[in-house]
Every structure is written in C-alpha cells, then in structure tokens.
Image (tube, grey):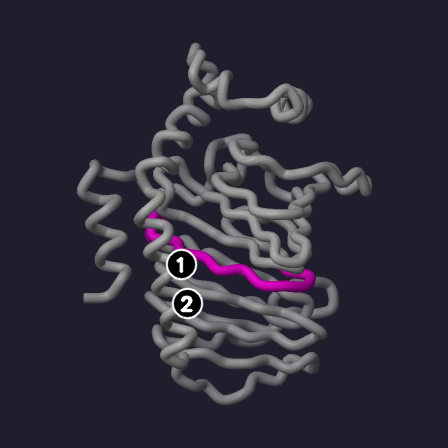
Amino acid sequence: MKIMSLTLIAFLALGTYSSFASFSNNYEVAIVRVDGDVLMDEKGDGNWVPVERDMRLRADTKIKTGFYSEAEMVFDTDGLNFARVEQNTDTTIQKAGFGLKEGAIMANFFNMAAGENFIITTPVHAYAMTGSGMRVEYREGRGNYKLFEGKGFHQNVAPDGSLTGDPSGITEGNKLGVGADGIVGPTESVTPEEQSTWDKFIADLVNNGDDIRNRLKNLQDTVEGAENDNASQNLTKDQERILSNNS
C-alpha cells in the first residue's frame, strides 16, 4: 500500500471535503509549522519579519528560510493542500503555487477541483501537478522536478515570466532535470532514497493531521469573523498586529 493511501484514510475518513486551493478568500495560506530562521516580506518593501505558526499570509508574500530552517503551510482549510518550504529557499506565495527564486519546495495537493493545477515557477521553467505530490528544487540556475504521485507537466518560462512552448507531461515515480538554458534532460525514475524522503514527508503529515485540522478550524473561525476565544489565545500580540495590518 502506498503512503498516499494512508493519507486518504487519515483525512477523508473524518468527513467530506470541498475542493479549494486557497485558505480563504483573503488569505492564500496558513502557516502550520516553523522551524528555525524563517522570514517574510508581506508588501515587497524589504521589511522582513519573522514568520510564526498560525499566521495567515496573502498571495505575493515573499518567504525566506535559513540554513536548517523550513516552514510548512496549507492552501486549504482541511490540511490536504500542504507545502513545505525547505532550507535556504527564497520564494513567493502565489495563487495555488509558488514563484521559486532559489531553493526547494515539497508539496502534497489532494483537495483540488477538476481543472485546477498547483504550479511552482522558476526563472526558466514551470512545474505543475493536477493533484498529489511533487518536489521542485532550483539552485544555481538548474531545476529538478520529482513527481511522486499523480499527474504532472512542465513548461519553459519566457524572460517576462510567461509560460512559453508546449507543456510536456510526466508520470508519477519519475524525475527530470532542467538546465539554465531551459533544456530538459532525460526522464528517470526516482531513487529509493528519494521515495523514502517523500514517504516520510507524508507520514509526518498524517501523524500531525489532528493537530493541523484543529488549528485550522480555529483560524478559519477568525477569518469568518466568528467569536472564538480559543483562537485568539493562540495568537501572540505580534501575530495579532500583523493580521490586523493585513485586514
């Protein structure tokens, strides 16, 4: 049995979920875990402040992680659209995706409507999936795309940031590399070590599922304007200030 099947058992057995690729109408993601040095620039003005658990961030917020640092976030209220921004990463949150300037992101998206895609765009190439899981790394001008579950595609990016050329598909269990010139290398199978890293990522998500869902429920209540003393107690004064400025 694949680890992904365990994810379905752990999450879907608890109720019926609606497809949604954003945390709310106003916020793209909710932060569920922060480890180490993680900063955000919310307005693109160079004002970098620490990211903390339970923050809700809008699209176009920039995220930077330091050495041995990472942040985990969800793009829905059920915890099924989940992403981990790995160490030494410089990225921007986008609608159902990321703009990846440098670094690596691992994502498991299973709560998407038909026709929706999760896309990670680098300066030279874009990588997407219609559901399930992938890891994208872009460092020193070179990209690496691993699709662990589901269906995916990739496409070149023009200098102005738009997609160019025809998209190419990739099947689960495979990976490919892309050079700084946009030339795509041969498709290969992911290694057992790479698959093991993915399986651990999913196992961690399953093990932390109850805690994630409970915190997301509180955060969603505050987004909807409901009175929820427990939710407000989970927010530090600094978080309340930042969320107030976002309103």
Amino acid found under the numbered disc labelled 1:
Phe
Q: Which residues are magenta?
A: 100-114
Name which residue lies at 37% across and 42% down: 79
Can residue 147 be spotted in the picture? yes
Q: Residue furthest right?
A: 46
x then y, percent, for residue 2: 24, 66
In the image, residue 97 above or below residue 3:
above
Instruction: State yes or no: discs 2 and 1 in contact (Cβ < 8 Å).
Output: yes
In the image, residue 223 above or below residue 71:
above
SS assignment at label 2: helix
Q: What residue sits right under mark 2 in the picture?
A: 197
Residue 201: give its label: 1
Name which residue lies at 27% across and 62% down: 3
Near-viewer residue (184 or 49): 49
Amino acid found under the numbered disc labelled 2:
Thr
Residue neighbourhood size for the residue with mark 2, other residues' Cα within 10 Å, grouped as few (<14), some (14–19), many (≥20): few
Give the dominant element type of the magenta stretch: helix, strand or loop: strand
Is 186 positioned to the left or the right of 80 in the image? right
